[in-house]
Image (cartoon, grey):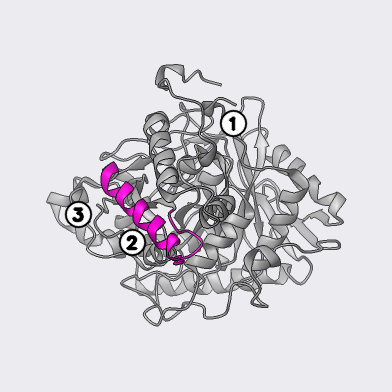
Amino acid sequence: MSNASDRTPVRPPLNEIVTWDATRLSRHIHDRSVSCREVMTAYLDHIDAVNPIVNAIISRRERAPLLAEAELADRELAAGQSCGWMHGFPQAIKDLSDAQGFPTTQGSPLFSGQIAQQDSLMSERMRAAGAIFIGKTNTPEFGLGSQSYNPVFGATRNAFDPSRTAGGSSGGAAAALAMRMLPVADGSDMMGSLRNPAAFNHVIGFRPSFGRVPGLVADPFGQQLATNGPMGRTVEDVARLLDTQSGFDPRVPLSLGEPLIPDGSSVSGALDRDVHGLRIGWLGDWRGHLAMEAGVLSQCRAALDRFAPLGCEVEAIDLPFDAEMLWESWTTLRHWAVAGNLGALYVAPATREHLKPEAQWEVERGLALSAQDIHVANVQRGDAYRAWSALFERFDYLAMPSAQVFPFDVETHWPREIAGRTMDTYHRWMEVVIPASMLGAPTISLPAGLNDAGLPMGFQLIGRPRDDWGVLQLARAFEAASGDLARLPPTLGE
């Protein structure tokens, strides 16, 4: 493991406040054992000390207005008023989502001066629950690629080894969460962007069922690959944030109106579940189709063994659908989505030159597609959905690694090869995440531990579409059997 001492500033011992999980922090704020001002001060001091190590939080606000907002939150509590469970929480929003008054750069110099005039729907809901926005979290340019570097803010580094990448595209969110700079974090996920960085930083990332967390997009009927979602250091924290983010909005026609918790219970009272007898299908490396760095499979499989004492059955199974056909459908639909978002920037030569090569490649492929190409890809996606859904007649949940490699050098834009096998695109090395994205299924990335070099890995648990709560309950059982999942990284002195 690389020595990061040359990047580590002298800092005081950790303030206990920043070590609390979000549920505990909320409880202490509301029972008035700690003030919102004290919380804000502790977090801002901690961010000053450790953010230079990982470069996760960007576009920060000045301290004085943040402390003033925290004092207002204290006065509200003194008057018996609480906005919600996040009352007084310092929060930073991923830089792909709007937060009123903050830049939304998307990691691109083309938008480095763009200030959001209103909140995104997700930001609006988090602010309404009491969050105080302190800044944004870093992301790759336009969220493309699972490596959070861009020409505006630079690269975000891994919490466990700052010489390595934090992953992406929610890399800033995951690194900030692991480094205790945020109590919980938001992110988005098209191709593993909540799962890969969670695995790389040993925290928990959850991609919800499509429609669970609505977002305001220009094409609300066509674009069904990406979704926003939560990250946390405990399953309960993730569940609470997901509950805040979820719910129907009439402006989003495909958003889900059904409650996250089926029986309407509170989050804390409904997570515990007897998982005895549940069947988990382990897909591993898809019978050799996926290239895997040495140690990934064994580490994830060893983590799954913790389900055995709980009475769960884990069985290795085969891929239910042709892997290359799934990839072809995925890349076609992704090209189409990216070209729709960035096509105007590509067509104009003055802006095209500011798009990174991977973005230009995606747009070029997208603009070359015919209507028939897109139709065929959607038909293939439907065939894949039915084939994968058939697995849920035999198994309650599916499992596979969250990534195919351990965190790699932060100067490497993307792995060109894995275990001697060449990657033919900039994102082929993340192929393991696309089944859940294509299914629109709820998927959680749980920490699987560290390898001999001290680098983290995670594994995915995938549930039936709309069974978000069941996935969270199974994850909670794993957490109870494992103990604290989100250990302090060595960069914080563990």
Seen at 19% across and 45% down, the residue is 353
Crowding at label 1, few (<14), some or many (≥20) Cα neighbours within 10 Å?
many
Q: Which amino acid type corresponds to the residue marked 2 in the rendered image?
A: Gly
Q: Which amino acid type corresponds to the residue marked 1 in the rendered image?
A: Leu
Dot placed on the residue nearer the N-terminal end, 2 or 3: 3
- For residue 62, what is the image quadrant? top left
Residue identifier under label 3: 114
Crowding at label 3, few (<14), some or many (≥20) Cα neighbours within 10 Å?
some
- For residue 393, what is the image quadrant? bottom right
Residue 273 in view (yes/no): yes
Seen at 61% across and 72% down, the residue is 466
* Dot 2: element: helix
Residue identifier under label 1: 455
Which portion, as a residue range, is magenta?
Answer: 62-88
CA gap, disc 2 to disc 1?
Answer: 36 Å
Camera-near label (2 vs 1) is 1
* Dot 3: element: loop
Task: Say which of 197 and 331 sits in front.
Answer: 197
Residue identifier under label 2: 366
CA gap, disc 1 to disc 3?
Answer: 36 Å
Q: Is residue 1 magenta?
A: no
Which quadrant does the N terminus fall into?
A: top right
Name the disc covering residue 433, or none.
none
